[in-house]
Amino acid sequence: MMMRMGAVMRKVVCLLAWLSVGQVSGSYLPQDMNRTLQDLLQHYKISKSDIYDGKHVFPKEELKGKMESQMLFMGGVLEAYDKLFGHMLKGLPTPSPLSATNGDKADTSGPSTAEPSAAGDTRFNLIKVLQKIRELKRHSYQEQLKVLHGLQKLKHIEMDNIKVQGKALWELPWIYEKANSLADNVMRRRRRRRRQTRTGLTREPERRAKGQQ
């Protein structure tokens, strides 16, 4: 269990490194968050061969599709980070009574040992970044997370239950109608956008001619 957790932690830190190193001008990553990530990377050190092995925890390919799909996938990524940071916090030593009075409301269960100052700083930094992740989820990804939670419920359907099978058959007509209706609406929207694009391209020479007059 500990070996598996260590492998996950290494992959997470690899992605944190990719996020912090790959900043550009105008990035959405705040400077204070970047500094906090750099401090965490000093604690969760991994080799350069692990960092640049080309294997990302969350594949970039999933972020090249339609905007709606990207938002849905990113909602899942943020949810995964929330859970991973929870595991990382649990892996730290239990805070001393003094540090426990600092308003730390996160789950601090872990080995019952006195917490060194470095571990206390790491805990504080993890909580700081976790709060940023949760703020982003709350402000921008509520709808996507609702969909993801709904999808997770589908995994628990009792496929071998005859009552479930019968009820699913009764519900299929309206679901099939709804599925087709949604697909038709998407196709109409795409055709409308293509027509608008073509219309705009057709009228552009006319606008230029008028401007030259």
Image (cartoon, rainbow, N blue to C red):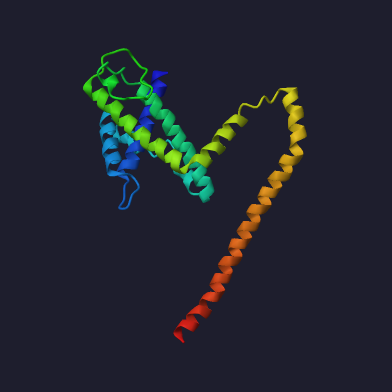
- Please tell me which residue is depicted at 45% across the width and 84% down the height of the picture: 212
Total labels drawn: 0
- Please tell me which residue is depicted at 44% across the width and 42% down the height of the picture: 139
Residue 55 visible in the current orientation: no
Residue 186 visible in the current orientation: yes
Q: Position of residue 7 (x, y in %)?
A: 39, 26
Q: Position of residue 206 (x, y in %)?
A: 53, 80
In the current view of this chain or complex, which residue is farthest to the top? 112
User: Which quadrant of the view contains residue 93?
Assistant: top left
Q: On the picture, is 213 further left or further right than 126?
A: right
In the current view of this chain or complex, which residue is farthest to the left? 117
Q: Nearer the viewer, residue 65 or 190?
A: 190
- Position of residue 149 relative to residue 111, above or below, is below
- Please tell me which residue is depicted at 28% across the width and 27% down the height of the picture: 122
Q: Position of residue 125 (x, y in %)?
A: 29, 31
Q: Nearer the viewer, residue 124 or 66?
A: 124
- Please tell me which residue is depicted at 31% across the width and 50% down the height of the picture: 24
Q: Nearer the viewer, residue 58 or 117?
A: 117
In the current view of this chain or complex, which residue is farthest to the bottom? 213
Q: On the picture, is 172 further left or further right than 30?
A: right
- Position of residue 113 relative to residue 104, above or below, is above
